[in-house]
Amino acid sequence: MSEQDDAKGLVAVTGAAGHIGANLVRSLLAQGRRVRALVREHMAGIVGLPVEVVRCDVTDGEACRRALAGARIVYHLAARISVGWDPPGRVETVNVGGTQKVVEACLACGVERLVHFSSIHAFSADPVDGVIDESRPLVQNQPHALVYDRTKAEGERQVMAAVARGLDAVIVNPSSVIGPYDFAPSAMGEVLLDLVHGRFPALVGGAGFNWVDVRDVVASVLQAERRGRKGEHYLLAGHWLPFFELARLWGRVSGARIPRLVVPMGLARAAAPFAAGWARLRGRRPLFTPDSLRVLRNHRRISCLRASAELGHNPRPLEETLRDTYQWFKQAGKLT
């Protein structure tokens, strides 16, 4: 597929106004692509951009077919991200049912390639000390599995079932995404803003994750569209860092006063249900939940060898990511 051919084809993006979507749409436009942006409610991430905007709830099969009609390429980003703050039913409806509706619409509309955004959370965390690559089994539908992990894994199964029926699709699995054009903001964007505004009384020890720049994810998924192998996964990770070290690095680039107190993971886990309940009473997303603390103990060793070799995935230093994120928050008026 040549760049000239790419420029002629319509690209549809579900979840176009989200954090990754806002970055992806801008990169597609920079390539001279025609973009149809599918959004359900919020549009801040794409306001003012020269795109065709279509209101579409991905859980509505007929709406998906109308929205994807004529699209050559589809990027499916729309998802419900939750680690303990959203009702499980809505997460399941969007991440599983919505993905099924999108892949069925892709088949019905003759879409040439689907790039499906899953998550590193779709892969089993066990064994915790092992290296996670594309051969790691997906999370199973078991009672102890986190709802987000389970639904992202099941969404992948929906995509692979459609591949078996002839759909040309690739799956990408980012780790925790940080970066500019975070309008909503995202869950991690909200954490960074909470740190700036002094809403964290303490940091949690024994917790960390793999953090990746949204722009590096977008650069790699654009290559996945062109070079990714049908039916393959590509892990798009960045750098693992303990949360308290990430917070202190954020403090250095933002000037925020970061709490010095670091509480043990055991104490944080004991307090999490009460902190989450208090946050909900105040109408806020909890700073941490039992599920989010569980997440921060998993997926430490992620291999991006396949994505590096086939897509040129090359994550930049975290300090650069945080510095650019702070500057964007500042310019967007998010720091007041």
Image (cartoon, rainbow, N blue to C red):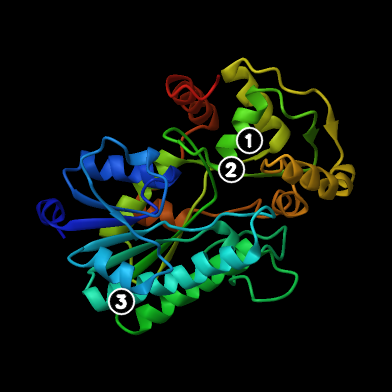
The residue that mark 3 highlights is 167
- Res 257 → quadrant: top right
The front one of 155 and 43 is 43
**Residue 204 tag number:** none
Question: Which marked residue is nearer to the observer: mark 3 or mark 2?
Answer: 2
Vertical comparison of 270 with 161: above or below: above
The residue that mark 1 highlights is 191
Q: Who's the residue at 71% across and 43% down the image?
A: 286
Local secondary structure at mark 2:
helix
Q: Do the residues labelled 1 and 2 touch (CB within 8 Å)?
A: yes
Local secondary structure at mark 3:
loop
- Res 126 → quadrant: bottom right
Q: Who's the residue at 65% across and 61% down the image?
A: 87
Alpha carbon distance from label 1 to label 2:
6 Å
The kind of residue on which mark 3 rests is Leu
Residue 135 visible in the current orientation? no
Local secondary structure at mark 1:
helix
Alpha carbon distance from label 3 to label 1:
38 Å
Within 10 angstroms of label 1, few (less than 14), some, or many (20 or more) residues?
A: some
Q: Which of marks 3 and 2 is nearer the N terminus?
A: 3
Vertical comparison of 166 with 11: above or below: below
The residue that mark 2 highlights is 187
> Residue 79, position in %: x, y?
48, 58
Residue 256 visible in the current orientation? yes
Q: Which of marks 3 and 1 is nearer the N terminus?
A: 3
